[in-house]
Amino acid sequence: MAALQALAILLFALLSFEVSTTTSTSHHHKNGLKSLHFTLFQHETINKTGYIIVNGVTGPAVGQTTTPFGTLFAFEDPLTETANRSSKLVGIAEGTSITSGLDGLRAISIAKITLRLKNHKGSISIVGGTHNIKPSDHPVVGGTGDFLFVQGIVTSSPVDLEGITVVYKIKFNLYWPPYAAQVSLS
């Protein structure tokens, strides 16, 4: 679960730019860098959008925030504009995580976040360490479509860890290098 939550956080959120009042988006051009900042919400439901593929070998039992050391988790979670699952769907976070902490709370996560925002479409790839009950920063390692050449950090923070569906706030801080504006995609 910890690894799943970490992955969900990673990707897990590059979705809408101009959305509801709870999601703010800003564009900046500073020092030649185009930037985009916005927040989405990842919803992970055990045995519906996220699954344990391999059980770990030692540590705490499977719970809402923990999995045994070595647990392999895969997910395909919806990303919405607000913490309410019925709010507008703007993306999907899909990936995997492996519980890497003996405490069952930390994981190595990789994710691809596919976004369908008002003015941006494409995907963002993230990788990094995830803590299941604390905010975690995940570096952006690539992108496609409107996110080609993007760099930045995606931060996942737990919002609601109770119940069958856990919710993470996914904050995107994205930057394009100057050469990205010179590339024309056909």
Image (cartoon, rainbow, N blue to C red):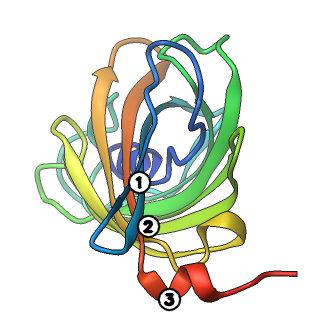
- Which residue occupies 43% across, 24% down? 166
N-term mark: 3 or 2: 2
Numbered circle sitting on residue 103: none
Q: What element carries label 1?
A: helix
Quadrant holding the N terminus: top left
Snapshot quadrant of residue 66: top left
Q: Which amino acid does label 3 sit on?
A: Tyr
Q: Are marks 2 and 1 in contact (CB under 8 Å)?
A: yes
Q: In the image, which is nearer the foreground, mark 3 or mark 2?
A: 3
> Quick one: label 1, few (<14), some, or many (20+) residues within 10 Å?
many
Snapshot quadrant of residue 174: bottom left
Numbered circle sitting on residue 10: 1
Q: Which amino acid does label 1 sit on?
A: Leu
Numbered circle sitting on residue 126: 2
N-term mark: 3 or 1: 1
In this view of the protein, which residue sits in the foreground, 119 or 15?
119
Name the side, left or right, on which 48 lies relative to 158.
right
> Quick one: label 2, few (<14), some, or many (20+) residues within 10 Å?
many
